[in-house]
Structure formats: structure tokens, C-alpha cells
Image: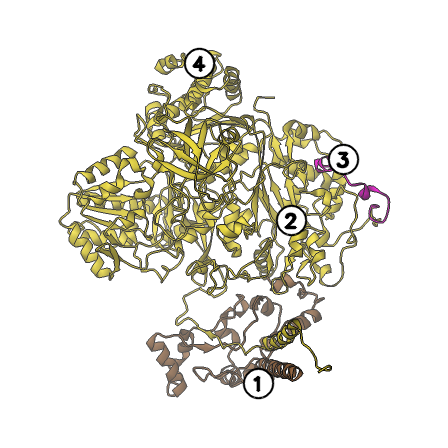
Amino acid sequence: MKRALALVIVAATLAAATHALSQSFSVQLGKNQGPKQPIFYSHELHAGKLGMDCLYCHTGAEKSPIANIPAVGTCMGCHKLAATDRPEVQKLAGYYERGEQVPWVEVYRLPDHVKFNHKRHVKAGVACQTCHGPVEKMPVVYQYSSLKMGWCVSCHRQNIDHPEYPAPMDCLVCHH
Amino acid sequence: MSDSVVYTRRDFLKLVGIGAAGAASGCAPPQAEKLIPYLVAPNDVLPGIPYWYASTCTECPAGCGILVKQREGRAIKIEGNPAHPVNRGGLCARGQAGLQGLYDPDRLKGPMVREGGAWKPVAWDQALRLATEKLAPARGKVALVTSHATGSFHALCGEWATAAGGTHLVYEAFAHESMREANRRTFGQASVPRLDFERATFLIAFGADFLETWLSPVGHARGFATMRARRDGGAFVAVEPRLSLTGANADEWIAIRPGGEMALALGMARTIVTEGLGAAGGSGAAMDALSAYTPEAVEQQTGVPGATVQRLARAFAARRPSLAVAGGIAAQSEQSVALHAAVNLLNHVAGNLGETVHFDRTLNLDAVAPFGEVQNLIAAMGEGRVDALVVHGANPAYAVPAWAGFVPAMDKVPFKISLSSVLDETAEHCDLLLPSTHALESLGDAEPLRGVYAILQPAMQPVPLFDAKPAGDMLIALARGAGFGQSFPDGWRPYLEARWRPLHGRFGGGRDFETFWRETLQKGGVWEEESAATPARWTGAPVFASPELKGTGELALVLYPSPALYDGRGANKPWLQELPDPTTKAVWGSWAEIHPDTAAKLGVRNGQPIKIATEAGSVELPAYVYGGIRPDTVAIPLGQGHTAYGRYAKGCGVNPLSLLSAATDAASGAVAYLSAKATVTVGAQAMDLVVTQREKIQSERVVAEVIPLAALAASAAVPGVSHAGSHDDSLAASAVADSMHGGNADTSHRAPAHRAAHAASGHAPASGAAHHPVHPSQTRPGKYTEPMARPPDYRPPAHAVTAFESEHPARSGRQNPVTEGHYKHAKHRWAMAIDLNSCTGCSACLVACHAENNVPMVGPEPIKRGREMHWIRIERYERKLDGGENDVRFMPMMCQHCGDAPCETVCPVYATYHNPEGLNAQVYNRCVGTRYCSNNCPYKVRAFNFFDYAAPEKPTFAFPEPLNWQLNPDVTVRSKGVMEKCTMCVQRILEGKGNAKDEQRALRDGEIQTACAQTCPTQAIVFGDLVDPESAVSKASHGERRYWVLGDLNTKPGVTYLKKVQRPVEPV
């Protein structure tokens, strides 16, 4: 009786653990499916077909540790005139007129206790696509890289002897 | 049933545990976070980039220039403005803690009105209407009380009060009216002179705590450190009954009978005159008064031997220019004008007027009301001559001694308005609260020194949790509403601008006003480099008389201002409450200091309760048994014992002002804080004295080392060490000269360790070796004692560079430093040099560190168990505290970033390790909290998070909203169960390296500064790169005074200390 009880407990907990583990991975990897955003904004259109520079909107990427989500005013810079008949643009204009910020859903979430500096990577010549994937082909942006430490370190290890920008392997560079 | 498996309780729990762990490891997917962008991005503001705003500190009347760092719209750090003439880059603990006033969780959320004894929130328009309705009929009977404000706000208050037909009173508890009155009588100028500590070669302080709260402490500290770096002279004598923090820095302590300072000053002046040592001739009535102060008479009055009086007088006259300063709050007696006049006379006869005492750029305290005016107001309020009272910034209900009866008189005023941003004791007695914005959210100006026009500018938008208005706007609105505001412009800003038009003409240099204004905001103000001196000459002295203490007690009661809390205004800031007092190392409370003999007579030990009773009242406090106080004296710090003011201040400690009976200075009307005698008995209530450093005696293991000045001069003659030092009069410069000598042989870039070895060859072993005998196992021949053979061109990798070669033969397993991987690319070895000769123990570095590194304040209970989280502490070591030759040593102690760190080898998870740039790193997310590292750290500099200080849902949460707004986003807020410690501000190192890379240049020395080094008023801490032989830290670390703390452990610290210089008081 007791053995049966123990087996049930072990089986149940293992099953729960497996389910939870698979759940957590499915979020991080593989599904190529981004979250639903409040406005259907297409990177494929803007960065791909229109060929806009990433830095036009994400102004901080080469100047600041934070790449920066563009202000609604930046969008409206064009969309006061451009494509004002589209429902999604009208939604945007609605936010702007109400003086409300757009609650974009975060796609890339850095784990806790890690600091990441966009500026250093962009200045060292790392292309945006290296980490963010072919954004110019993504109608909905999804998390392309795992953002796990092994992923960071694998690239740093490859560039440890880079002649101009040797990638540091010191823990303190990211964990401080 | 024999085959049945019997699970013990323990096994069962294990199984459940495994299951739970499995479930937890793959916990639910993280909830999607929202990214909220700006609606319209402000121009030139980029998230992630800090912006700095120049302003002026308002934490005390000194008016230091500050730079406020803002990130994403929040002010997160205050630093001293290096360009400002008052403080030149340094900032004290109180200034650093200004942010906790801005983010005070107990700030008023909006205007409130008292209704039947309870506070009721009210809308702004309604509140202002109520105020004007009450003010209008009160015209002619209005009183405006503000704290010290110079510049336009002061002018506005004056005009406002005139228009209202009332009075404006500038209330400061520490008004220094005795000094101003004495200067008026003796020099014909009722102002506070500029004191040139820098030039003085001999300094004597008669109770003036010039490194703590007296006048302009940061400016004084800077000059004092320069003076103390001299080889010729630079001696400092403190004359006070209780050894203060300032006195602890003295070479000699004259433990004078309380109130005897004046007699000693006059005795010295008489000796100088009669022996013809002085510059000024002896004549006039003052000289006649001197004749009574023979050394014998002084000995009789003060207990100071006549020979000492003569010795001090001769030293004072021989070393020119010298400087005598007088009269801190602790020495403010009923004859404090006489004391100031006596010290003025001493400066006069020694010829210091115009040499070290200048009446050019005087401290602007002229508007502060003498206490007599406060008493006039109290009388007016009591007699019903005030119908409306408006209070801004000041807290007289707390800071005016109870005997003066401020509170009962105030309660008789029909309508009282408080513009305070917190519910302090004064606001509690008001009828209407109109919260004003904090100084860091306000626009304004200040004239802290004559001729220095400084700016206050908002470093951020007003904290939206608190609905406050600028005080200037409110005063104008009230005046207009009540019908006497016709002369005022529309608001505070136009008023301010109008006041700056004349300055534009003077300093504008032809630029238009907008450009001038913008440049002024960027610089922090405008000032001329020199100010014209107002001629001052000796005009005669008042009658000299010594104070008598009242009461029947046998001990003199000394009340002194707390260096952290000032007059009590810092009490609601946890950074300041948890700042160990520089004297007692006590936190979160009050205490009474008594001499060991007094304690033995009473039969009490340290921390036991004693009852201090005077004619006016009694208090019970834990005793602090302190050798640095006379046996006939008991001392209590001011600033605690609030009954309101906020959660941290309320109920913490006692307010000893209740022990005073009515007593003011005879000539100036100042409150006589030194006026009572007290009876001390054993107390009944058990209470706690929470201290962070119990033992202040070093025993046989000396960690804070000293070197006699004579030995220092002699060492300059040791072969292999430059003689340049002996010709130079500065210790700091000599350190440079020594290191230069080592570098002369080879100007190419050599490894500093080599150069150090070269220089060290001429040195005798450091005194560290002399103090700690080397263990036999360390000298026995064998694997761990023989120095490793190195090729002649050996260059250690950056992380293994040390300031100098270890004198100890013991070898560790790490004699071969890592040279592989990323370690070979490192170019820097970060290190510090700390000059114990400059450190005054002021503890500003602690608060700077807390602010920069998100260090939680844990409260008194954990500290009782030794669980404070400070990353840096100031150790205080005492010896011979019985008057005469004085030996108190202060030593900043933080992680030493050892080359061979004992903590690194014991970490089972590699959470602490040596990084390629020589830092001892701590990785929080790797740490599992074994605490082995802390156990193995010989310096005890690691702090463990026993509780969750960063989790809002926990009772231990240390950052209640909006204190958490101050947190530095570049530094991880640590969670429960991890070890933390000094990182040498690695976030600043990374930022500095990044900036250099962006500009494609090499790092400049001094470009990166740790928070502690940046704020240090005396620049005792130098941070930099040891690999660069020209860096300030390399040069300082190679000076003749260098040593490593616990150097015999061979930890090869990255922090090099420079020994404190012990110097004789008499000329050599």
C-alpha cells in the first residue's frame, strides 16, 4: 500500500515537472511565434519592404545600453500622413490622440541578474540580426535567440581573440 | 508483510521534495511584461543614458554645489560639483542622503486641513482659498518662519512679509549668532569669516567641530587635509571637554573643563603678548583684560597646566600663519560671545587676521535670526499679536528648546499654515498643510558665500506620488489671494528671472539672457574667482567672563550636534540613521557618553541604562563608556527623539533639549546648549545600544598604522629612496617623488610590480612585519617559502599586478597567475590607495556607497546580530584617550580585492573569483549562500542577505515606495541568500571603459571614480589602474607610507593604505 502511494507520488511529481519543463522551453525556443501585440505592427513591412534602418526607431541601440522602443510620436512622424486609412494605423492614431502609451508586449526578456549593453555590441559590429534573427522577414517578431547564458558565451568564446573587439569572458561584465 | 517497504518519515519527505524540486525547476512560463514607450520622446533624452543637473545642496546652510544624476527621469545619485567654490567636488554624508528626503515615503501626499483634530485631504484650490481667507484679515499680524535660504527665495520672503505687514524670521537651530556678534564687536563685521585651513601651519580648535556641522564642513575638510599633508607643521590641537570627531583628528587633546576654553585662549594671547611673540602690538582695553590671565590663573580656572598654556602659545605664535577657531554648538554657553572674542583676540595678536582669517568670501549666514528674535516671535504669538503663522522648511517645534515655549505660544495663533513637505513636529501643530516641493524638484538660487551665485534646479519632475507645489509660487499665490500681492510677478519663475537680470549684466559677458541662463544652469552658478576683502581690524573686545553651569548635579551636561542628523533634520533618512556615529559607532538611537571612571563609580557597563537628570527634566539612555570625555562631563547627541516627522525618525532615541533650563548667551542671545549640570544615576529601563564596532582597541594586531613624522623624514635618507621628499613640504608630493625615482632608471613602460620591487629593495620591512611575527612555517625552507624564479623580463598579467612586492616570504599555490583565455587581454588592475592621514572619519563614503550600490538599510535588530549590509565601514581605533597626546585612527575598510583572496578558494560554486582586471568578483546568481567566503575573509567585508530586503511583499522590505525609485538601475538589487560586497563600483568601470572605447582613446587616469572616492571631502581615497605607472593610485601606492592591512597574510590586496602621520605639537 505504502509502496503504491510512494510510486504515485513520484510519478505525479515527475509528470508535473516534465510538463512544466517542456512548457518553459516551448516559450523560449522553436515555435517561431511571437506574442499578440496591441497593434499589428509588421517588421517585415517596415524593415523589409520599406527598408527602414533599425536605428531609425530603435535609436538607443548604438548610443545606449537600452535599444529603446520608439515613442508613439516617432510612429506618428510618418503616420500622420502615411497609410491613415488602415485600421491598425487608426488604432495607433487613437492611442496618440488619447495621449495613451501603446502597451507593447515584451518579446525579449533578459533573465534576472544579467545586464546587457546594446551599444557595446552594435559598436563592435554585431549585426542586429545576429541575435534578433531575420526581423525584416518577420510579420510578427518572435524570440529568435534563447538568451540563455550558454548562447551568449558561445559567441563570446568564438570572439575571445578578436583583434579589435576581444569579447570578454568575465562574469562581472554581465553580472554586476 | 515482511517484504513491504517501510518509508521512514525522512524518506517520504525526500521523495516529496524531489518531486517538488522537479516541478519548481520547470515553473510556469514567465508572464509577459509590457514595454511602455514614451508617448512623445523628450528631446535629447535616451533611456539608459544618465543626465546630470547642477544644483545646490540644501541639507545645511553651507550650500555645497552638487550634481544630480538622473536616469529615466529619476534622480538616483548626488555628487559634489568639482567646479563649485564651496566644496570642490566633495560632499558629506548628509548631502549624499538628500535623495532620501526627496523620496521620503512619509512625504505628504497633498494638501490637508485639520478638522476636529484629524487631518483631512483637501483639493489644492480649496486649500489655497482657505489659506487666503484666513490670511486676508490677519494682515499686519502675519509671521513667516523659514529655514535658511539665501538668494531670491529669501528676498521673496522678505517682500512677502513686508507686504503682509508682518515679520519674516529665518530660523536655524545652529545660527552661529555668537560668532557674528563677537566679530561685530571685535572686528567690526557681523559676519562669518572665510577660514583658510589650507594655509595654516598650526591649528587650534576651541570646541569648534569644523569637520562635522560647524559652518561649512566639506570645505573645511578639504583645507584641513591639505594642511595635514604638510611636512612642516600642520599640527592640530583640540580643546574640548568631549573628544568630538573633529577632536579625534587632533595631535593633542586638551581635555578642558567645560566652559574653560575662553580662559585658555586668553591665557595663550597673554603669553604671546607678554613674551613679544606676536605680530600685533598689545594695547587697548582688551590687553588690559589679558593681564589677569596669567598661566597660573588659567590653570586654576581650567585645569590646564600653566606650562601647557605657555607651550601652546609659543607654538601658536612660532608657526605662522596659524589659526584658532572657536565655538561649536557643544561649546555654546552663556558666555559664547566672550569665547569667540577671546579667540579673535588670539588670532589678532598672532597676526592671523588677513592671513588665515579673511572677510572676503564670507559665509552668508547674515540673515539667520539670532535666538532673541525667535524669543520675540514666541512672545508675540503668546500675547496674541500674531493672527496667522506660515512656516516653511524650519521645524522650530522640535529644535527650539522646550523652555522657550515655542509650541504653547504657537498653539495660541488662530491659524497656522505649514509649507513643509513632511508632517514634522511644527506641521503637526498647524491647521493647514500646503506641501511644497523638495529642493531637488525646485527651481531657485542661493548665495552660500558672498559673491557666489548658485543655482537650484529641478533634477527631475516632482515625484508624482506627492502633490506638491513650489514654495515660491505658493507664497505669491497666497499674497495675491489675500490682497497684498500686487507687487509680485505672476509666479516664482518670473520673480527669479527678474532677480537674475542684474547678474546677467555683471556676468553675462555680452551674451543674451537665455544663453547666460542656460550656461549658468549647466555650471551650477556664477562667481568671480576672487572676492574683494572687506577690511577688518581689531576694534576692541567685550568684557570677558567665564560661563557658570546651572544646577546641582556633579557632571557638566554637553549636548553636541550629531554629525549625521545635524539639528535633527536628517532623522527620517534611513541612510543617516544607520550611519555608524563616527565616535561611538552606534546606529538608530541616542546614548549618553560617560567616562570609564564615572561608569565605574555608578557600576554600569557599556550599553546599560543611565538616568541623566537636570533641573529641567530627565532622560534615560544607554551609557557609552568613552575615554574621550572628562570624568566630570556627560555628553548626549542632538537630533533624535522626534515625536513626528516620519516612520524612521519617530520614537528613535531621545531629544535631550528637554534637559535645558532657560539660558541664553549674555551678549548675543544664543541658546546656551552648555549651561546645565546633570546628575547621573543608574537607570531602570533596559535598553539597547546598537553598535557596529564594539572593540576600539587594536590589541597586538595593528591594522591602522601610524608613522612618526621624524621617521618619515629619516626614511627619505635611506639609500634607494629619493631625497626629493625632504625638500618638499607635502607628504602627497613626496609619495610621488619616491615613485618617480624608481621610474627614472627606465622610462619605458615597466610593470609596476618590478618597479615596486626595485623601490622596496631600499626599504626596511614594513612595520606590518614588525607588529606580526612571522610564523616559523613561513620561513622554513620548502616549496612555499622560496621565491619563484622569474625570468628577468617577466611581466605579470594585469590581474596579478600588485602595488608593491610582498615582504612576506610565504608562497601560495597561485604563484603562477592565469595567463590564458581572456585573462591575457586585460590591460588594467583596478586598485585603491587610502591615505589614513587624510581620512577624518566623516563617513560620507558610506552613504555614497549605499546610494550607488543599492545597499539596503536593515534596521537596529539585525545590526545587533552583526548583520549590517554596509559594503564599506570606517573603523575607529583609539589609544591613550586621557588628554594630551591623542591617537585616534580612522580606517575605511572595504573589500580589499586581494590578489590571493582567501574567499575565492573556499567558494564551492565559483561565485566569487578573481577577474582579469584584478577585481574580486561576486556573482549573485551563482551564489548559493554557504557564507564560507565570509568566514574566510580576514577583513570581514562581506555582507550576507539574511532576509529579502528587496521584496515588497516581505516585512523586511528596505525600500518602501518611493525610496525604491532611488535604486541604481546599473546595479543588481540582491535577493535573500546571497553574499555581497564592494565591487569597486564595477558598473562605473564598465561605463568608463565604454566611453573611452566610443571615443577610441585610452582611458584617462581619474576618469573612473568609485562613489566613495568621488565624494571624499579630503580625497583620502584614490582609485585607478595599477598597470599604468603614471596613475595617481600607482604613485600613491609606492609612497613611503604604504602598507597592506594584515599584510602578513600575504593576500596581496588591491587596496594600499598610507600610514597616518603622527606629528609633534611643538616645533621640531
Q: Nearer the viewer, mark 1 or mark 2?
A: 2
Q: Nearer the viewer, mark 1 or mark 4?
A: 4
Magenta-drawn stretch, dominant element (helix, strand or loop) = loop
Residue under label 4: B297
Instruction: Tell me the shade of chain B.
Output: yellow
The crowding category of the residue bearing disc 2, from other C-alpha atoms within 10 Å (few below 14, some 14 to 19, many at least 20), is many
Q: Report the span colored magenta.
A: B762-786
Q: Secondary structure at mark 4?
A: helix
In this orientation, does residue B147 appear? no
Q: Position of residue B401 (x, y in %)?
A: 32, 37
Mark-to-mark CA distance, 4 and 3: 53 Å
Looking at the image, is mark 2 or mark 4 nearer the viewer?
A: 4
Q: How is the image coloured?
A: by chain
Task: Report whether mark 1 lies on the same chain as mark 2.
Answer: no
C-alpha separation, residue under disc 2 versus residue under disc 4: 53 Å
Q: Colour of chain A?
A: brown
Residue B627 or B772: which is nearer the viewer?
Answer: B627
Which residue position holds label 1? A32
For disc 3, the marked residue is: B762
Element at badge 2?
loop
Q: Position of residue B552 (x, y in %)?
A: 36, 25
Q: Nearer the viewer, residue A10 or A129?
A: A10
Q: Are marks 2 and 3 on the same chain?
A: yes
Q: CA distance from mark 1 to mark 4?
A: 95 Å
Tell me, yes or no, whether dots 1 and 4 are on the same chain.
no
Residue that mark 2 sits on: B896
How many callouts does the rendering have? 4
| Neighbours of disc 4 within 10 Å: few (<14), some (14-19), many (20+) | some
- B144 shown above or below B597: below
> Which amino acid type is marked by label 2?
Gln
Sequence-first tag of 2 and 4: 4
Q: Quadrant of the N terminus of chain B?
A: bottom right
